[in-house]
Amino acid sequence: MSIRKYVSLEQAQKLIPEIRRRILRIMKINKAIEILCNIEILCEDDCEGFYREIRFNRKFHQLSYRLFSEMNSLTEKGAVLDWLDQGIINFYSTKDRKPIFLCWKMGDRHIKYWHGIDEDFSDRKPISRLKELDGKFSKYL
């Protein structure tokens, strides 16, 4: 059983507004987690320190749960978070019956690139070089 969800260029393109919202949420949650991880709890009273540590850990785990829930939602749509800081998402698709990634980057209006699943972002090629992808991609060129 494959856990990958394959989408056409048209399907992936329709997902972009939702993916954009989810990536922004993931970025905010990730930033909050980074801030929490840099907090050092110091208390003279052991009981107060223990209480604060419990509250801190509860918040950390709540944020972690939200982060992974958002990431899981991406994968259920067929999107793979490749590089959070840059907002780079890959969508599983196919070309000539072989798996490929359709590449989208935060800030781009449309999916502009693709690459093989064994390649990385630096190996991406323009969508215009795809001969056919579900027969429906010319409106995104």
Image (spheres, rainbow, N blue to C red):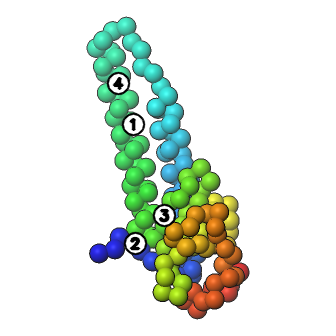
Residue contact at pointers 1 and 3, CB within 8 angstroms: no
Taking the spot 48% from the left edge, 64% from the top edge, the residue there is 80
Amino acid found under the numbered disc labelled 4:
Glu
- Nearer-N-terminus badge (1/3): 1
Question: Tag 2, which secondary structure?
Answer: loop
Residue contact at pointers 4 and 2, CB within 8 angstroms: no
Q: Is residue 69 above or below residue 130?
A: above
| Residue placed under numbered mark 1 in the picture | 60
Taking the spot 47% from the left edge, 25% from the top edge, the residue there is 39
Q: CA distance from mark 4 to mark 2?
A: 39 Å
- Nearer-N-terminus badge (4/2): 2
Q: CA distance from mark 3 to mark 2?
A: 9 Å
| Residue placed under numbered mark 3 in the picture | 80
Amino acid found under the numbered disc labelled 3:
Val
Amino acid found under the numbered disc labelled 1:
Phe
Q: CA distance from mark 1 to mark 3?
A: 24 Å
- Nearer-N-terminus badge (4/1): 4
Crowding around mark 1 (Cα neighbors within 10 Å: few <14, some 14 to 19, many 20+) is some
Q: CA distance from mark 4 to mark 1?
A: 10 Å
Crowding around mark 2 (Cα neighbors within 10 Å: few <14, some 14 to 19, many 20+) is some
Left or right: residue 112 compared with residue 44: right
x, y (%) of residue 115? 59, 72
Of labels 2 and 1, the one closer to you: 2
In the rendered structure, find residue 53 and report the number of the disc placed on it. 4
| Residue placed under numbered mark 2 in the picture | 4
Left or right: residue 31 compared with residue 4: right
x, y (%) of residue 122? 65, 63
Taking the spot 61% from the left edge, 63% from the top edge, the residue there is 121
- Nearer-N-terminus badge (3/2): 2
Residue 53: image quadrant is: top left
Residue contact at pointers 3 and 2, CB within 8 angstroms: no
